[in-house]
């Protein structure tokens, strides 16, 4: 009941720091990508391999909510939002060839673009919304909410136009985590409802509620490099194994 009243999880729930949750997200993403790249091509619709694939797919649903949550956390706590955005864009560019190898075994395929671009666009979205909040919310809360919804709608269209990974879902989830930053229970619940077709993403949204607010020991460039490096390896394996 405390969580419902305050919008914040009880203190006893908050047991993991940011570093620990990010490593959980990395592991989840790795399992999901290994499944997609190396296991699902061999599925024949039955047998233990199918059960393994289903398990990895479920565990892989943890990553997305955590990455979106920490994107918003980073927006509020970074020393430089501009540098944060530039780093995301840099690694989005670096990741595109590995992502295309991973998804299509091609060096370039513009039918689907990597998650770093999605994170960058999500950051731009909440940044614009935050600027509008500073200028409009004191005049009229309704005006600010209305303007923010327009921004989100436009950015959803942009995400879909450029075929970004998780497309409009990421924009909406980032907006909800931003909107309910001080009430993470509501942000997690509404975020899950916005992408409920990914049923097991509830594991990731629930994981955001055990964050204790501490950064933990993190390695900035490892956090950024993990994405392009692991999908490059998986992409090269796909090419080598012709799958």
Image (spheres, rainbow, N blue to C red):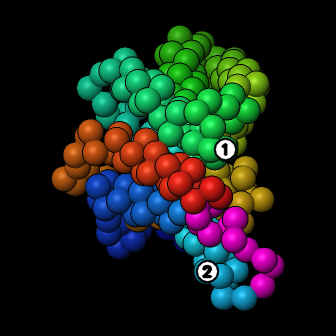
- Reply yes or no: does residue 145 show up in magenta: no
Q: Position of residue 64 (x, y in %)?
A: 55, 52
Q: Position of residue 177 (x, y in %)?
A: 54, 43
Q: Which of disc 1 and disc 2 is earlier in sequence?
A: 2
Q: Which residue is mark 2?
A: 52
Determine the residue positioned at 66% across, 88% down. Answer: 48
Q: Who is closer to the viewer here, 48 or 165? A: 48
Q: Who is closer to the viewer here, 76 or 166? A: 166
In the rendered structure, which segment of residues is drawn in magenta? 35-46
Label 1 secondary element = helix
Q: Which residue is mark 1?
A: 104
- Reply yes or no: does residue 39 show up in magenta: yes
Determine the residue positioned at 57% across, 59% down. Answer: 241
The answer to whether residue 129 is seen in the rendering is yes
Single out the mark in the foreground, 2 or 1. 1
Determine the residue positioned at 50% across, 49% down. Answer: 236
Give me the disc on residue 134: none
Q: Position of residue 73 (x, y in %)?
A: 40, 41
Label 2 secondary element = helix
The answer to whether residue 142 is seen in the rendering is no
Position above or below: 214 against 45: above
């Amino acid at each position: 009941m405390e969580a419902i009243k305050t919008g914040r999880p009880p203190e006893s729930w908050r047991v993991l720091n940011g570093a620990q949750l990010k490593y959980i997200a990395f592991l989840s993403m790795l399992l999901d990508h290994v499944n997609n790249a190396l296991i699902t091509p061999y599925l024949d619709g039955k047998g233990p391999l199918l059960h393994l694939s289903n398990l990895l797919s479920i565990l892989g649903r943890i990553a997305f909510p955590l990455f979106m949550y920490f994107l918003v956390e980073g927006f509020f706590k970074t020393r430089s939002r501009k540098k944060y955005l530039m780093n995301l864009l840099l690694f989005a560019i670096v990741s595109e060839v590995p992502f295309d190898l991973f998804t299509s075994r091609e060096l370039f395929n513009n039918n689907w673009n990597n998650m770093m671009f999605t994170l960058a666009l999500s950051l731009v979205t909440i940044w614009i919304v935050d600027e509008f909040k500073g200028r409009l919310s004191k005049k009229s809360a309704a005006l600010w909410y209305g303007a923010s919804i327009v921004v989100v709608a436009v950015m959803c269209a942009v995400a879909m136009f450029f075929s970004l990974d998780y497309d409009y879902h990421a924009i909406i989830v980032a907006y909800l985590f931003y909107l309910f930053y001080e009430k993470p229970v509501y942000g997690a619940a509404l975020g899950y409802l916005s992408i409920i077709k990914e049923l097991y993403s509830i594991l990731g949204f629930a994981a955001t509620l055990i964050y204790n607010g501490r950064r933990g020991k993190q390695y900035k460039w490892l956090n950024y490099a993990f994405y392009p490096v692991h999908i490059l390896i998986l992409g090269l394996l796909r090419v080598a194994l012709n799958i």
